[in-house]
Image (cartoon, grey):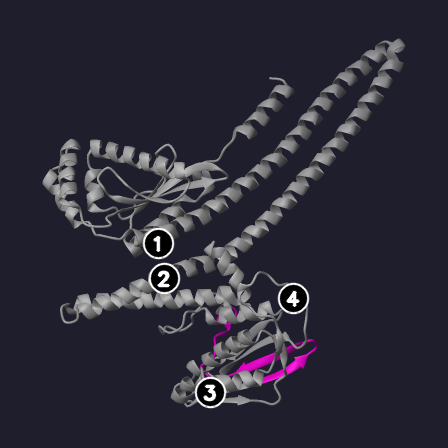
Amino acid sequence: MTITDSKKDGEKRIMSKKANLKELVDLDELQSIQDSFANTVGTSSVIFSPEGEPLTGFSNPTGFCSLIQSTEEGRRRCFHSFMAMSRKALELKEQKILYCFVHGGHFVAPIIINGEHKGTMFAGQFLPQKFSEEQLTGIRRIAEEINIDPELLTKEAKRMRVVDEETVWNYSSLLFQIVCVIAKLGAQTEELNRAKDALQKAHDKLEIRVQERTAELAERNKELMEANRRLEKQSKELKDMQLATLNIAEDLDEARREAEKAKKQLEEMAIKLERSNRDLQDFAYIVSHDLKAPVRKIAMFGELLEESLAGKLDEDEQENLQFMIQGAKRMQELIDALLTYSRVHTRGKPPERVDLKGIVEDLKEVELAIPLEESGGEIVIEEPLPAVYADPSQMHQLLQNLIANGLKYHREGVPPVIIIRGKVEGSMARIEVQDNGIGIEKEYQDRIFGMFQRLHADNEGTGVGLAVCKRIVERHGGGIGVESTPGCGSTFWFTVPVEERGEKRGESGDERDKNEEV
């Protein structure tokens, strides 16, 4: 094979390479999401390739569905039914709720990356209402066709739970949004791979040119040896060597230009990756926002169920129902905490002159009045507190979180005393919130500002409060930290500007919510 043939084969191989969903997405991660989702909402799901190959396993299949697929004919009929629903959803290019050959409902959504159909997600099976007698008659006939005991299949059909289409749509649409986010990351990975291929192609071209010129130089060397034997051709051979050298210089210069072009492409990819990181930063907000309604419904209907079954449940059943309701309420708290964290930037207000003493006085009278009374605590303000230039509502939230922690984690038998002081250091104000509580071990002092970091075994709190404090301070261009001695207390400090500074404003929270609804 010649060098030119090798070059053409390499280019053809790069142009023809197309990644499938297995190469773009971590299927184990998808499986884990499906399984967790199925265990939480009781809806099974699976993802097929465009050719009908199962890319993930069925999560939490119904007994009705499992029985149908227990025979070869049943599996064949299921396969053709899934493929028909997949083609229908792909034709419409949108998510649809469709029904299979045994009248079971399925949420069907095509997964399209860069205009290519990479797979289809199915979530179900479910019933919007109990099977009618006419449908049950049809199911008995189908059972005979797929070699299953009709009575056994009818029994499983009657046991299927009824879930309305709107509920399945909400659950499955959320799962599909998560799959699409992962697929989007896969598409970005595919773009990065194409950029790497382009860089490799430029490298291969340079290597091929070097090989070509090396071959030419070898030939010229041979001519020079001939010239030593034939003096009359020496002048011509020297001119040929000079021309070859110029050609090499031109080729090297062209290769340099191509390398600069490849570098520019990599820089553009870096910009895209930075944009992708911003999308990931918004991911927690989107998931929390969309999870809020179904979790609230779980808690509400759980309480209604508890009320309607009062006195009818044994102790274990009552305890399990309480666990479900408490778990849903706990998830609501976590979702609210995530929304608070994500809204630090998107819902932030323009900075203005803020009186910190006034904020503390308001907290003593309203939000912290009950904790102060219950703990017998005291809040002391060392005069004067400097005025700062910041978002008033976020300063209110920041001070509330820090003071509330001091009141909560006090030593047993010792009333909490919170001392607040401040001073100006250059263009920044350093504010300190000191308590006489239980203190924090040295090894945990850097970790407490991370998400979901809780140092105590109580069930109160979400582990997000100090992370929100850090995010607020960083939005204002300041820093935050803690100095603590176990058994003696802690001093939390943060810095914020004391004068107006330029701030790059993004879209407002209202604009963001509007975009998400679209």
Q: Residue furthest left?
A: 151
Q: Are marks 1 and 2 in contact (CB under 8 Å)?
A: yes
Task: Name the amino acid, label 3.
Answer: Glu
Q: Nearer the viewer, residue 71 or 481?
A: 71
Examine the rendered structure and indicate whether residue 217 appears above or below residue 165. above
Mark 3 in CB contact with mark 2 (< 8 angstroms): no
Q: What is the distance, in whole Å, between disc 1 and disc 2 at their CAs?
A: 9 Å
**Of callouts 1 and 2, the N-terminal one:** 1
Mark 3 or mark 1, which is nearer the start of the sequence? 1
Q: Decide whether residue 431 is among the magenta residues.
A: yes
Q: Which type of secondary structure does the marked residue at label 3 adopt?
A: helix
Q: Disc 3 designates what residue?
A: 365
Look at discs 2 and 4 and give the one toward the viewer.
Answer: 2
The answer to whether 478 appears left or right of 150 in the picture is right
What type is the residue that disc 1 sits on?
Asn
Q: Are the residues flagged by discs 1 and 3 in contact, CB closer than 8 Å?
A: no
Amino acid on which disc 2 is placed: Ala
| Nearest the eye: 249 or 502 | 502
For label 4, the residue is 503
Residue picked out by circle 1: 170
Give coordinates of residue 286: x percent, y percent: 45, 57
Q: Determine which residue is flagged by label 2.
A: 293
